[in-house]
Amino acid sequence: MGAIKTGWDFFQDQILGMHWLKDLIGNLLVKAGMGESRFPGEFLHFFIYDVIKIFVLLAVLIFLISYIQSYFPPERSKKIMGRFHGIWANIIGALLGTVTPFCSCSSIPIFMGFTSAGLPLGVTFSFLISSPMVDLGSLVLLMSVFGGKIAFAYVIVGLIVAVVGGTLIEKLHMEDQVEEFIRQAQNVEIESQKLTVGDRMNYAKNQVVSTVKKVAPYIFVGVAIGAAIHNLIPEHIVRSILGEQKWYAVPLATVVGVPMYADIFGTIPVAESLLAKGAGLGTILAFMMSVTTISFPSLVMLSKAIKKKLLGTFIGIVCVGIIIVGYLFNIFGYMLL
């Protein structure tokens, strides 16, 4: 057991966390005469280290996940989900969301395709919730920052929110709240193209390039905000607003996250800094879930596909689920740290 723990710690710290890179950048900044000062020395240390680490992990993860995703085109995913019923269908929908696009806006066109294909509304919403919230990339990147316990707990509760949310929407029988053009869309069965290993490799490479270009601005902004919080905002201020004991911290973090638009890769540097400054773990996770799942731009897109009543129900269910998760992590999260 000792050898396994040592190996796991090495993998988590040196492979995922890239602590060797952190030490290297720190030494280079010291030699450049900027290693001791809080600004710009420590600010640059945080910024350069996190940007390089996130882009490296991002490229590797997108390549691997996109390669897996090439086996699950929309037509095949529809067939897989169509074989299941009840709660199992919601679970499969949520799990399929883990190998699909990295942000909520990218997930909405697939959600629309699933809905027009006649899949149960609750199942498609389980997919829509889980896709941006708990993709495989979030698991690995969370492990690199917060450790395996928190990462796995985040993914599990995210899947629970997706399954419960989709199930509740299914029970409310709100199919008439889907816009007519989606319900009346003709579903054409397309035979999935047989791809070679080379085709899948090229697909994965193209996904790396296109996704990195799309999310790069959010990563730079997210890391800059994280560096500013880490080095310029006093710890007592963060604790006084977002500490575990503040009852309003979780709802506040959830509401603050809605106007923003980023994926998990842009929010983690901010979350890392907030945790270091004493913000509650549940408060931070609520913020991350809100930004990635119910951001304002994604809600605008979704409003074109569903009517106001269903949109409001979706927002309400997800917000309540996120807030409950936030409070639970604030109460019991110390066991994961």
Image (tube, rainbow, N blue to C red):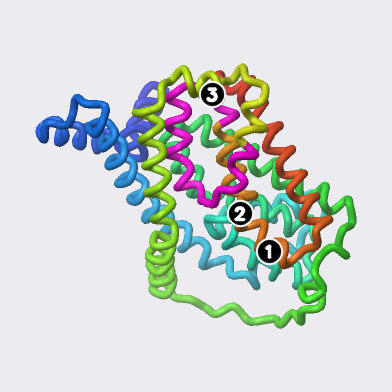
Give the alpha-carbon distance from disc 3 to disc 2, as whole Å: 24 Å
In the rendering, at what x and y percent does residue 193 appear?
55, 80
Task: Characterize the local packing of mark 1: few (<14), some (14-19) or many (20 or more) Cα atoms within 10 angstroms.
Answer: many
Please tell me which of labels 3 and 2 falls first in the chain: 2
Give the alpha-carbon distance from disc 2 to disc 1, as whole Å: 10 Å
Task: Characterize the local packing of mark 3: few (<14), some (14-19) or many (20 or more) Cα atoms within 10 angstroms.
Answer: some
260, above or below 178, in the image: above
Give the alpha-carbon distance from disc 1 to disc 3, as whole Å: 34 Å
The amino acid type, in three-letter code, at marker 1 is: Phe
SS for callout 1: helix
From the viewer's perspective, tell me whether residue 320 is left or right of residue 268. right
336, above or below 168, in the image: above
Which stretch appears magenta?
254-283
Q: Which numbered dot is residue 10?
A: none
In the rendering, at what x and y percent does residue 305 appear?
73, 66
| Residue 140 forms part of the magenta stretch | no
Toward which corner of the image does residue 122 lie, by quadrant? bottom right
In the rendering, at what x and y percent does residue 190 appear?
65, 82
Q: Which numbered dot is residue 336?
A: 3
* Residue appearing at x 26%, y 27% in the figure: 38
Judging depth in this view, the residue of 53 and 238 nearest the camera is: 238
Q: Are marks 2 and 1 in contact (CB under 8 Å)?
A: yes
Q: Are marks 3 and 2 in contact (CB under 8 Å)?
A: no
Q: Which numbered dot is residue 111?
A: 1
The amino acid type, in three-letter code, at marker 3 is: Leu
* Residue appearing at x 78%, y 76% in the figure: 181
